[in-house]
Amino acid sequence: MSTETNAAPGSPLGEKTVPAPLSKTRPLYWSVRRELWEYRSIYVAPLAAAAVYMFGFLISLVWVPHRMHGMMAPDSTPQLVVLAMPYAHAGMLLTLTGFIVGIFYSLDALHGERRDRSILFWKSLPVSDLTTVLSKASIPLVVLPLLVFAITASLQIGMRLLYAIALLMGDKSAATLGTPRLFEMELVMVYSLIVIALWQAPVCCWCLLVSGWAKRATFLWAVFPPLALCVIEKIAFNTSYLTSVLVKDRFYGFVAASIDLKDRNGVPIDGHFIPLAQLAPGRFLSNPGLWVGLVFAAIFLAAAVRLRRYQGPI
C-alpha cells in the first residue's frame, strides 16, 4: 500500500518544502514595470523631444565657428551664459515634456483601466489598491524625473562632443570656448527635478484622484473645480488669492522658493546658467507651501486608493 507525501523530489522523506517569502517591494516593482509596458509615451515622448532638439542643434552647428570669433574669455559670466544656452534650452524642453506627459498620464492612469474594463483582471491579482495607486503616482513623481535627467544628460554630452568637433573643424583656436561647465549644470538639473517633483506633487495626485472618479472628460474635471473657485472668489470678493496660490505659485513658485535669483551683489542671475552657490535647499525645505502641498498630495492619494477599492468599470 502506497502513501502520498509532500516531500519534494530528492529531499529526505517527510521533509516539507516551504516557498520563499516574496519581498514586500516586489509587487510595487512589477506594478511600476506594468505602467511602463502599458504607457510607452512615458519614455517615447522625452526621447522624441530629445531627437527633435538634436536635429535642430545639428543644423545650428554650421554657424558655430563664425559666432565664436571675437568672444570673450570662457570663464566670464556673460560667456558662460552664451555657451550654456543650448544646453539649458534642452533641459527646459525635456523638463516641460516630462511634466506634460506626467499630467496626462495621471489623468488616464486610473480612468483607463476602468474604461477598458481591465480593472476586473488587475483586481483579481494579489496586489493591493494601495500598491497599485502608489505605483501609478511614482511614474510622474519618480520615474519620469529619472528618465528626463538620463535623457537630458545623454543629449547634453552628445551636444558637447558635436560642438567641440564643429569648433575644431572651423577654428582650432576657438575650441576652448566651447566648454561650458556642463557637470555643474547637470547637478543643478538634478536639484531642479527633485524640487519640481516635490512642489508639484499635489497637482499630479489631484489628477490621479480625478482619474479614479470621473467617468469621462478627466482633463475638464481636473481643471474646472480650481478654475470655478478662482472665478467665484473674483466675483464675490474682487480678490485673486486663489489664483495666485493654485495657479501662479503652484506651477512656477518653486523657482523663487529654491533658488537665489540674485547674486551677492544684488544683480539678477540669468536662468540659462545657475551656479551651485545660488541653490537654496534649506529655504526650500522650510517653505510652508512645500509641506502644505505634500499634505494635500497625501490626502489626494488616500482618496484615490479608496476610490479604486470601490469603483468598478465604466
Image: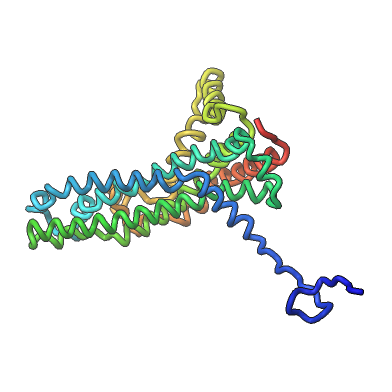
Q: How is the image coloured?
A: rainbow
Q: Residue at x 22, y 55 (%)?
A: 80
Q: Is residue 269 visible?
A: no
Image location of residue 119, percent across then percent down: 65, 40
Q: Is residue 303 left or right of residue 188?
A: right
Image location of residue 267, percent across then percent down: 28, 48
Of all residues shown, which one is farthest toward the right? 1
Image height of 248 relative to 260, above or below: above
Q: Is residue 28 left or right of residue 21?
A: left
Observer-nearest of 210 and 199: 210
Of all residues shown, which one is farthest toward the front? 1
Image location of residue 307, percent across then percent down: 68, 38
Q: Is residue 140 visible?
A: yes
Observer-nearest of 187 and 243: 187
Of all residues shown, which one is farthest toward the bottom? 12
Mark count: 0
Quarter of the picture containing the N terminus is: bottom right
Quarter of the picture containing the C terminus is: top right
Q: Quadrant of residue 211?
A: top right
Q: Residue at x 35, y 53 (%)?
A: 152
Q: Is residue 196 left or right of residue 159?
A: right
Image location of residue 171, percent across then percent down: 7, 58
